[in-house]
Image (cartoon, rainbow, N blue to C red):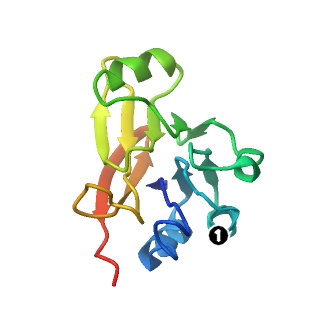
Amino acid sequence: MRLLLTSDTHLPKRAKQLPPVLLTEIAAADVVFHAGDWVDVATLDVFRERARRLVAVYGNNDGPELRAQLDEVARVECGGLRFGVVHETGPAQGREQRCAQRFTDLDVLVFGHSHIPWDTTARGGLRLLNPGSPTDRRRQPHCTYMTAEVSGAHLTDVRLHRLPPRT
């Protein structure tokens, strides 16, 4: 099972459109995770039209129209693993412990907000993944997203993809 993880698309404020490679990845994935900060409903519609299965939440920059369509936290089972998606997890310091205490029912937590890629495992086994942003690198050298595979109830081949600079 192929997964695409993304967050913080911030359209049309941070970019005018989604990177073409991300659109290709959406269509290729069995499950697409988006950890919030869509900013506009049109971007959510693009994901819904292209994704086979979309697991998504709203972020702090998402207004009432998006909040009416999305939850703050989403939980799904994929290939024998329990996934959760949330936008904010608080400061980096203490993140693993906080998330492990809050999300005891999960194997993997996908989150966003910081635009900083993150891949760690908390004591107890909760995997925390932040794919960064495909449209707003902030203080990072590149815009990013992640892909992963689920096979035999294991998360494998987690990859951070760097996008080329926009022209």
Q: Quadrant of residue 137?
A: bottom left
Location of mark 1 (residue): 46
Looking at the image, which residue is at 44% across and 44% down? Answer: 113
Q: Secondary structure at mark 1?
A: helix
Q: Quadrant of residue 140?
A: bottom left
Q: Looking at the image, is 136 positioned above or below residue 1?
A: below
Question: Is residue 46 rendered to the left or right of residue 123?
Answer: right
Q: Residue 10: x, y in percent?
A: 52, 60
Quadrant that contains the C terminus: bottom left
Looking at the image, which residue is at 63% across and 50% down? Answer: 62
Looking at the image, which residue is at 28% across and 34% down? Answer: 120
Q: Residue 13: x, y in percent?
A: 52, 66
Q: Looking at the image, is 106 positioned above or below residue 72?
A: above
Looking at the image, which residue is at 22% across and 61% down? Answer: 141
**Direction left: furthest residue:** 141
Q: Residue 114: x, y in percent?
A: 38, 44
**Direction top: furthest residue:** 101
Counting the numbered discs, the total is 1
Q: Looking at the image, is 115 positioned above or below residue 25?
A: above
**Direction bottom: furthest residue:** 167
* Residue kind at label 1, given as amino acid type: Val
